[in-house]
Amino acid sequence: MKLQKRLIAFLLFVLLATLTFALIQKTQHPNSSGGYEINRIQVADHTLDVYIADTNNKREIGLAVFDEISEQQGMLFVFDTVDRQIFWMKNMKFDIDIIWINGQEIVDITKNVPVQNGASDSELFRYRPRSEVDKVLEVKAGWVDKFDISIGENISM
């Protein structure tokens, strides 16, 4: 009887330790969603799985929660109003391309935006489109050139 209780206690401990470890790994894995909804979109002829940043908090943090993303991933920032949105690279760990979208049309592209490690908020460069947008797509740097994406092409969700 005593042996059974010890065995059960040991197995419960192992189970709890395993679950805790799995939870920690999931929250630190760059491919986990980080609390973002994931949708599939089409950019020209290319499919991407994108994290949706549709609240002020999610838009403020953006891709900075990830150590990296794959070529099949991105983040789509969705705004309630059409405006010349301003973006920066605060706390980013990798370079990106920024695709500026109004409605379903790409209206501007900013390629190979570099990280700015060690820069204070006042030193961070601000990026903005030439015209007003209601969505912004961030992808891994070089993606726009690799897939020959250009202004005037459409996205679909």
Image (tube, helix red, strand yellow):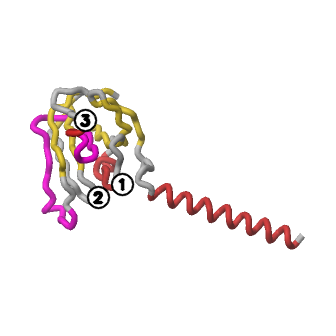
Up/down of 24 relative to 80, above or below: below
Q: Which residue does the image show at 44% across and 55% down from the upper left?
A: 29
Magenta range = 117-143
Examine the rendering and report whether any part of residue 97 can be seen.
yes
Q: Secondary structure at mark 3?
A: loop
Which numbered disc, 1 or 3, marks the residue that appears first in the sequence? 1
Report how far apart the C-alphas of labels 3 and 2 lie in the structure.
Answer: 23 Å
Give the class, few, some or many, for how many residues have Cα within 10 Å of label 2's Cα (few <14, many ≥20). some
Q: Which residue does the image show at 34% across and 53% down from the upper left?
A: 68
In the current view of this chain or complex, which residue is farthest to the front?
146
Q: Label 3, on which residue?
A: 147
Which mark is on residue 93?
2
Report how far apart the C-alphas of labels 1 and 3 lie in the structure.
Answer: 23 Å
Residue type beneath disc 1:
Phe
Which mark is on residue 119?
none
Residue type beneath disc 2:
Lys
Q: Which residue does the image show at 85% across and 72% down from the upper left?
A: 3
Indicate the position of residue 49 as horizontal and vertical percent values.
38, 38
Tell me whether circle 2 and circle 1 mark residues in contact (CB < 8 Å): yes
Point out the image quarter for the C terminus.
top left
Which mark is on residue 66?
1
Tell me whether circle 3 and circle 2 mark residues in contact (CB < 8 Å): no
Residue mark closest to the camera, 1 vs 3: 3
Examine the rendering and report whether any part of residue 52 can be seen.
no
Up/down of 96 relative to 156, above or below: below
Task: Kindly indicate the quadrant of the structure image that contains residue 98.
Answer: top left
Residue type beneath disc 3:
Phe
Task: Kindly indicate the quadrant of the structure image that contains residue 149.
Answer: top left
Confirm whether the magenta stretch covers residue 126: yes
